[in-house]
Image: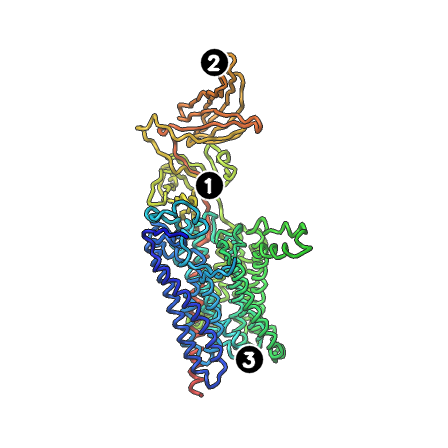
Amino acid sequence: MNTTEYIGEHLFIGQIGNAFVLLSFVCAIVATIAYFFASKENESSASWKNIARTSFRLHSVAVFGIAGTLFYMLYNHMYEYHYVWQHSNSKMPLKYILSCFWEGQEGSFLLWTIWHVILGNILIKTSKEWEAPVMTVFASVQVFLASMLLGIYIGNYNIGSNPFTVLLRQHPDFSNLPFVQLPTYLESLDGRGLNPLLQNYWMTIHPPTLFLGFASTLIPFCYAIAGLWKKRLTDWQKHALPWSFFGIMILGTGILMGGAWAYEALSFGGFWAWDPVENASLVPWLTFVGSAHVLMINKNRGDSLLTAFLLTIITFILILYSTFLTRSGILGDSSVHAFTDLGMSGQLLLYLLFYVVIAIILIIRNRRELISQKQKEEHIWSREFWMFVGALVLLISSFQIIYTTSIPVTKKILSVIPYLQDIERIKNMAPPAKLIEHYNAWQIPFAIIVCLLIAVTQFFKYKKGDIKIFLKKIYISFFVAVILSGLFAWALSLTQLFYILLLFATTFAVIANWTYMVSVLKGKIKKAGASIAHIGFALIMMGALISTSKQQTISQNSSRTSVESLSKDFSNNKNILLSINDTLKMGDYYISYSGKDQQGVNIYFNVDYFTKDEKGNYQHEFRLRPLVQTNPRMGNIAEPDTRHMLHKDIYSHIAYADLDLVIGDQSKKDDYTEPHNEMLSVHDTTFSSNSIIILDSLSLAVDKKSLSLADSTIAVAACFRAIDMNGKTYFAKPIFTIQNASIQPIESEIKELGVKFVFWKIHTNTNQIEISISENKSKQRDFIVMEATIFPGINILWMGCIIMIIGTLIAMRDRIKQYTAAQNASEQTD
């Protein structure tokens, strides 16, 4: 038994946090049970409802207590707790403490729970006669989320992961290390720190927004389940609809923030990469949009009831499925976002299956009413018909995305089924090699259809429309869109058919919705939320089309030194090599690398962009400062810098740089860098800071006499050729010798480059040699390898994001006003 008294540990704060975790879990259970009995609507319902409300409020206090305790631990750097050590360190700026809070599984579950608590308390105030059944479902979800923080072990199985009970010295990765046995182990301990990719201001606002969007899908789901449970199949929709628009706005905003983060912080060169975790957020949003439109059909016509239930339920189920995908560890090899598995895969799967089974049972129980519902025949020229078609297109689109994203899950399931696990096709199942091209090939046709539908649907009337009136209203917008999109396609040199069709569809959607606002709504902005949101969505699609299809990599290498010789990952068609103070042409600009400077953990590289005037003089246009964030524990991360212009962005990031280089320090003319070892075969290439080095050959033709070597000495020369940044060639011949059974290498130096070679070993079994290379610090030449891309029309996309959010906000406000007015009218009637 360990009786060591550890100095500086704060165990009491962990006990407080754990007490809040237990209180949260127990109160969620009590609230669920009490609301269940309150929903029976008997003489004891009022008492049960009071108990339920009190329990949920205590649960809320406990959740905020958990959050406050965890934040306190992070703020005060209590590294005795594994969660704090894993996600923060003392050098990290204070502004990223919030990112540390939700970087881990436990913190992100807690963030999700906090939003549920806030929405749940609003729901208690607003749901009125629906409170008991709706909050029964709502509180049951809180039970599952609270269980994710329990950290209770039953045999080899753990229920949740508790950030307050796992001490660093007790964690399996550390418990056997000598330093944690010391009573004073905390005195010099620092944390591992936040993932460098997350040290960006977007990551302080993107996750909270995204998780609020996830949380908002629960409320329509609760109303749908409550409607099925209480057999109130036709009046839950009006309560769910305002929440649906709220959720669409918030979840959409969160997804777009993620795209902005990727564009600003990641170096893959774009705002969307069809990453599995990106897809896991996008798919529920697509079905959410489809669900809201079907709810509108049901509100106006009373039909499409089964579809309204299915899409509303599927949206929340997909949120749970995406949670399983991103937290089970199954996407660990295919996504930069995914969490590692903390042993909660079974718990997550149980969480998902519980609500899938509940939904299926309730739908089967109400199947007769749902199937026998009197369906009014939908006229092909009615608004609801085309809204329904749009919802189906979104559903099919989301199915394609989730199908491809789920290939790792499908493979894992099939590989454990007898007789299937040995089938070669299943063994080789993998996501498509060209992932972006695969998704684009499927999703562009869906986007075309959706944009055409949002262009025309609002011009139809509910129930039954007149095709002649419709054509009269739409034909001008159609022909203007044909002309404008034709001109745009010609100006952009678009040749692919689907690109041209998407450009037409987005242009048509913008013009038609603008026409609808002006001619039908008479410019009444308060009623134009849907049209504004549609314009925003069309602009997003247009911006995505133009920026991705016409993006241009302008960083072709024009220096005499090939970047391909530096690494197989570099290409002369994508990367440019810049030596310090040299000026090279790149696209329409001339660029010069003028050096680097360090601010904290960030090393900034100063790249100046020039143009030439008519007289040939350089005119400075702007400076970009891409950076490399240094992180010895997790590896350095390059972050791009972007010049934003009205019609385009110039986006650049560092592909390679020597971060430790000392530039031009003449006081160290006799000082050499620490030698680094290289294992080379003939014709292999390596490099120094100022040259490319090639091993041309090995030679036994060594002039032993001039080197004062005995005839019996074994001597082999390595013939090196070095090419500097200006293309000039130099030669070196370090010699490997064996005299009297002793290895005595003879070094060789290229003084002009300050590069010294020592040939000290031969591997006869692999035909390779080992050399060490060191450099004179006064001769080192700083250089970088950079990639730069132009994204034309990208601001159309960002403008569309803002417009879509504003439009959805206006539509949500209008739905809330309609809902409130209906509620007030109902109360007055009663």
Q: Which residue does the image show at 45% across and 44% down from the upper left? A: 788
**Mark 1 vs mark 2, CA separation in Å:** 51 Å
Q: Which mark is residue 555?
A: 1
Q: Where in the figure is residue 470, as x and y percent of width and height?
A: 56, 72
Could you tell whether 200 is left or right of 449 in the image?
Answer: left
Give the amino acid at mark 2.
Answer: Leu
Q: Do the residues labelled 1 and 3 touch (CB within 8 Å)?
A: no
> Label 1: few (<14), some or many (≥20) within 10 Å?
many
Give the amino acid at mark 1.
Answer: Ser
Examine the image and state in which quarter residue 753 appears: top left
Q: Mark 2 or mark 3: name the one nearer the start of the chain.
A: 3
Q: Residue at label 3? A: 231
**Mark 2 vs mark 3, CA separation in Å:** 101 Å
Q: Looking at the image, which is closer to me, 804 or 16?
A: 16
Q: Is mark 2 on a helix, strand or loop?
A: loop
Q: Can residue 573 be seen in this view?
A: yes
Q: Can residue 488 be seen in this view?
A: no
Give the amino acid at mark 3.
Answer: Lys
> Label 2: few (<14), some or many (≥20) within 10 Å?
some
**402 to 686, vertically: above or below:** below
Q: Where in the figure is residue 227, as x and y percent of width and height?
A: 53, 77
Q: Where in the figure is residue 586, as x and y percent of width and height?
A: 44, 40
Could you tell whether 394 is left or right of 641 in the image?
Answer: right
**Mark 1 vs mark 3, CA separation in Å:** 64 Å
Q: Residue at label 2? A: 709
